[in-house]
Amino acid sequence: MKTCIEFMKRISVMAAVLVSGFSAIAQDEEIKKAERLLDKDQSGKAIEVLNQAITTYPAVTKLYYYLGYVQLATGENGQALKTFEKGVSLNDKDAINHVGLGAIRMAEKKPTEAKVFFDKALALGKSKDVAVLQAVAEAYLVDAKFAETALKLLEKAKSLDPNNPKTYMLMGEADLLQNKGGPAITNCERAARLDPSNAKPYYNIARVYMRSQNFTLAEENFQKAISIDSEFTLAYKELGELFYSLKEGEKAVKAYESYLKLTDKPEQEKLRYAFFLFLAKNYAKANEVFLNLSQKPEVTPTTLRYYSYSLFEAGDYAGSQKMFEKYFSIIEQDKIEAYDYSYYGKLLQKLNQDSLAIISFQKSLTLNQDQADIAQLVAETLFKTRKYVEAITAYEALFKIRKKPLSMDYFTLGRAFYNTNQFEKADTIFQKFVELQPKITVSYLWAGRTKANLDPDATGGLAKPAYEKLIELASANAETNGNKRDLIEAYKYMGYYHFQKDELALSKSFWQKVIELDPNDTQAIEVLKELK
């Protein structure tokens, strides 16, 4: 009988040990699940998992630490403090929640106060508890100045358990804080070998390559992370940023859409998504997102700025103007950027408000003089509105910015000088235009016109070479585009020139060419009558 009773007692003890073991395994699985959810930017789900675990195991104090850890990571510092304090109140001898209280102080930039809690936690664990060493190290990693302190703790953890993947992950993060890319990658690779099912090591390796702008290897490792865990949310987010940096808008949008489907706070990321849509030139969809964001009471000037841009690009000029006005009304004047004024100037041009457009462009140039495209718009708009004197000044300013002017710059400046009767200056400019565009008739047309004004009686024949070259180029296709009109002008000059030289037969031949192109040209008809 006695033997039977002893046997039953042993069975009961064994059962208790087994239940305790299964319980511990279950708790660890819940903690691991919550950590993975946090890594995936699904903090809400992580908190749900931990709260449920606490309901099931209310006396297990480490669950409070991990709950507080997630709350702290998501900016809920006040709630995290209460959670850590609850854990301490349940078991003051359990070191882990003391680490949490120190982590709160580190988040508040109070490292001296934090150290008091860390020292107590390390003393309770006799500096031999790997989880405590990891937790203290991770808490220190909120400030790069303490990266070396964290590494020393992690080296101790590694000596106690050389096959713990989390230790190497944290070492990699500490290395990254110190811009030690090589060691960071090495430690992350060790973590990946020890825990092949975890996508985070490859995600962190990709971050190292992102920092060094090695986008090819960064993308490769983000894709590795996704291949291991197709729901590793942050990998999609960073891929979006990577493609944004490369100005690959459509790829950025696709990656970010995957991120938004997985994160549990998509509304907070909609503005970034709208930027990616804008980059991809998907203005219609971008405007749908911007519209929703612009109607919120806490709308930011940045949102209104890019909404204005996007409406402009979509061709909704009235909507763009309305949004620009709202943007300008809420942003501080010294925060307005040159690009804002240049975009607004382009909008005003579309609304046929050229004078106001010029003012906006000039404000843009005041903030940033190195904008050749905007300086060109100012000059072109002044010329278009027949403000030739101001256009000349604007082109001279443009030439200081654009060290190698475009042929079109010379063409318009030359005409501005021509229209203000500054024929010698116009002649100099048109000669440069001819050098840049020697194969088009318009070059010689304006060179000829200018020379003709410098030699109004054609006695010197200054315009003759230019008009002869025009005739050579245009005769091949006399009816093409403006060639007919330009040829008529050239033939008339040549007819007049030879008339002045008393070369009547030659003169007559050119006037007859005019009639061939335009039988109703009254001037040619009258001259030919006189020549008979």
Image (cartoon, grey):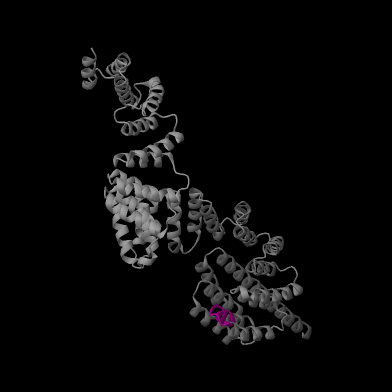
Q: Quadrant of the N terminus?
A: bottom right
Q: Position of residue 386 (x, y in %)?
A: 27, 44
Work out whether residue 148 or residue 23 is closer to the camera in this orientation and state it. Answer: 148
Q: Residue 191: which quarter of the image?
A: bottom right
278 w.r.t. 135: above or below: above
Q: Position of residue 224 (x, y in %)?
A: 63, 54
Q: Residue 174: which quarter of the image?
A: bottom right
Numbered marks: total: 0
Work out whether residue 355 or residue 91 is closer to the camera in this orientation and state it. Answer: 355
Tell me the residue at 36%/39% (across/down): 424
Tell me the residue at 61%/51% (across/down): 216
Q: Position of residue 479 (x, y in %)?
A: 34, 21
- Residue 15 located within the stretch drawn in magenta: no
Work out whether residue 289 or residue 512 is closer to the camera in this orientation and state it. Answer: 512
Residue located farthest toward the right when viewing the structure as drawn: 3
Say whether residue 463 is visible: yes
**Boundaries of the magenta span:** 101-110
Say whether residue 281 is visible: no
Q: Quadrant of the C terminus?
A: top left
Residue located farthest toward the top when viewing the structure as drawn: 532
Q: Position of residue 372 (x, y in %)?
A: 43, 50
Dominant secondary structure of the residues highlighted in magenta in the image: helix
Q: Residue 527: which quarter of the image?
A: top left
14 w.r.t. 222: above or below: below
69 w.r.t. 375: above or below: below
Tell me the residue at 32%/46% (across/down): 381
Work out whether residue 212 or residue 55 is closer to the camera in this orientation and state it. Answer: 212
Left or right of 439, for residue 506: left
